[in-house]
């Protein structure tokens, strides 16, 4: 028997600590009882069109039957087994498929269970890559203004220190080198000079390719990645792409880096890896990085092993998600979605209180010129029947690639109507 929502809502209000929320003043979370397609069903019977695909994960929409089937089948065989000293088919198959999909230069998959930890592992891999060669001074990274890589202590330190999200901790964290992205020759020259001073103490360069997501859906051209690859090579640094947001079709190609002529040494993946069904992340390294650990010295091993790494249910979900990318025209859907978002949001461009409207693949951002009351705006969006989570001065849409035309039109019309009525 199912408990009536009123009972568990009260339990939650008393005992659950919510993310990114001032618990004293934040609006209570909306109780959800069901999801399907691009819809979130609330306990009071309302149905919202989801504009953000649950923090950019549910790329095939919610409850895709093929993923559900794969997870159910795996549940009967083996939901989880420890990954230390044991292995299983879903993890082995997924590793092979990820390396094949990523292409040349991607050879080894290390599993974790969240994006932040995948980035932590990438950072640890890079630092130890140098440690194993006797270089003990390379403990810092070059990361970028506008960047976001997670909420753990290691990853907070490579986020933009001026972003309000983690600024409270600034000064308590490892001090990395944070610079503007090299968008032109002048900023590349400045970065080159910075690296001449700092390269000896750096393990690598960490960047979100093409779109800095949580930093404000800030987009940059693919040439930035080519500049970073050249700088990494010139100064002898590892290049790490954080594709936790951009991976699996979000920017219009399976991985954002495919739009650039520049491959990294390490890449991090999560979010849409399982089609948004189960937590799973992967840090994928090149043979060169892996070779840095290959030794007769046990001290050169990568000492990392989250309890739930390589979870069999999550790997089965990820394999089913990759099947869907193979079987169904996801990238064509992203291209169509991109055109529809561009056309649908175009009226916002003419509003004086809108600074910019930008679209790349299935990512659209309306950047407002001034600050706004985020809670009031979120409430208005819910009243209009859509689930959209504006942050900073950005109202963004990252829907499922499979969103139906009616739901998409409804979503875009609601956002345009509300942005239009803001002044
Ligand atoms: N890296 C990027 C680019 C992200 O967008 C995120 C999450 O938004 C993370 C890392 C952290 O992932 P998680 O929230 O799964 O720890």
Image (cartoon, grey):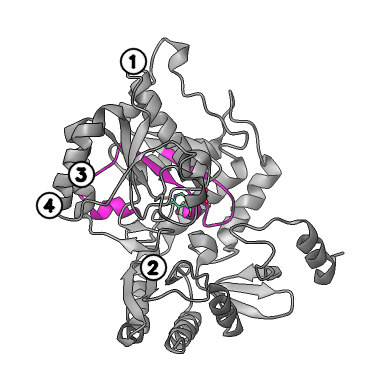
Residue 345 on image: x %, y % = 37, 81
**Residue located beneath label 4 in the image:** 185
View extreme (top): residue = 296
Q: Tell whether position 277 is magenta.
A: yes
Q: Secondary structure at mark 3?
A: helix
**Which one is closest to the eye, mark 2 or mark 4?**
4
- Give the extent of the magenta segment: 255-283
Q: Which mark is residue 134?
A: 1
Residue under the point 32% across and 72% down: 358
- The number of discs equals 4
Calculate the distance from the C-alpha at mark 4 to the C-alpha at mark 1: 34 Å
Image location (x, y in percent) of residue 259: 25, 55
Residue named by callout 3 = 191
- Residue 104, which numbered label? none
Residue 109, position in %: x, y?
43, 35
Label 4 environment density (alpha carbons within 10 Å; few <14, some 14–19, many ≥20): few
Dot 2: few (<14), some (14–19), or many (≥20) neighbours within 10 Å? many
For label 2, the residue is 362
Q: Tell me the distance, in whole angstroms, between the alpha carbons under discs 4 and 3.
A: 10 Å
Give the CA distance from mark 3 to mark 2: 31 Å
> Which residue is more in the foreground, 67 or 150?
150
**Separation of residues labelled 3 and 1 (CA atoms):** 26 Å
Q: Does residue 225 belong to the magenta stretch?
A: no
Q: Disc 1 versus disc 2: distance between alpha carbons?
A: 44 Å
Crowding at label 3, few (<14), some or many (≥20) Cα neighbours within 10 Å? many
Residue drawn at (49%, 39%), measured in percent from left and top? 172
Tell me if the residue at label 2 has its CB under 8 Å from ligand 1.
no
Residue 59 drawn at (x, y percent): 48, 62
Q: Residue at x 62, y 61 (%)?
A: 21
Question: Is 202 situated above or below 66?
Answer: above
SS at mark 1 in the image: loop
Q: Is residue 85 left or right of residue 221?
A: right
């Amino acid at each position: 028997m199912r408990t009536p929502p009123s009972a568990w809502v009260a339990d939650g209000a008393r005992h659950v600590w919510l993310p990114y929320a001032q618990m004293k003043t934040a609006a209570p979370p909306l109780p959800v009882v069901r999801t399907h397609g691009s819809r979130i069903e609330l306990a009071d019977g309302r149905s919202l069109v989801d504009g953000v695909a649950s923090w950019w994960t549910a790329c095939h929409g919610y409850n895709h039957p093929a993923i559900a089937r794969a997870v159910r089948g795996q549940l009967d065989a083996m939901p989880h087994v420890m990954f230390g000293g044991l292995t299983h088919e879903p993890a082995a198959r997924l590793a092979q498929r990820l390396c094949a999909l990523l292409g040349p230069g991607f050879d080894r998959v290390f599993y974790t269970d969240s994006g932040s930890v995948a980035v932590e592992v990438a950072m640890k891999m890079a630092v130890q890559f140098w440690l194993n060669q006797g270089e003990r001074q390379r403990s810092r990274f070059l990361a970028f203004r506008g960047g976001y890589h997670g909420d753990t202590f290691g990853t907070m330190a490579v986020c933009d220190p001026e972003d309000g999200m983690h600024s409270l901790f600034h000064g308590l964290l490892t001090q990395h080198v944070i610079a503007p992205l090299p968008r032109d020759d002048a900023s590349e020259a400045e970065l080159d000079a910075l690296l001449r001073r700092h390269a000896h103490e750096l393990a690598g360069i960490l960047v979100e390719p093409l779109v800095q997501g949580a930093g404000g859906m800030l987009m940059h051209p693919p040439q930035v990645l080519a500049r970073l690859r050249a700088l990494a090579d010139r100064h002898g640094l590892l290049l790490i792409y954080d594709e936790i947001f951009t991976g699996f079709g979000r920017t219009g190609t399976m991985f954002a880096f495919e739009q650039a002529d520049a491959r990294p040494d390490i890449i991090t993946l999560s979010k849409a890896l399982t089609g948004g069904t189960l937590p799973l992340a992967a840090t994928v390294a090149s043979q060169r990085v892996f070779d840095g650990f290959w030794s007769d010295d046990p001290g050169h091993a990568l000492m990392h092993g989250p309890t739930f790494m390589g979870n069999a249910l999550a790997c089965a979900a990820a394999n089913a998600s990759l099947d869907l990318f193979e079987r169904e025209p996801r990238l064509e859907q992203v291209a169509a979605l991109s055109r529809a978002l561009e056309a649908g949001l175009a009226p916002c461009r003419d509003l004086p209180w809108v600074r910019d409207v930008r679209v790349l693949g299935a990512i659209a951002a309306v950047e407002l010129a001034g600050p706004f009351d985020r809670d009031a705006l979120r409430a208005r969006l819910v009243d209009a029947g859509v689930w959209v989570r504006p942050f900073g001065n950005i109202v963004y849409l990252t829907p499922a690639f499979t969103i139906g035309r009616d739901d998409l039109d409804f979503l875009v019309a609601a956002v345009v109507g509300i942005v239009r009525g803001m002044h």
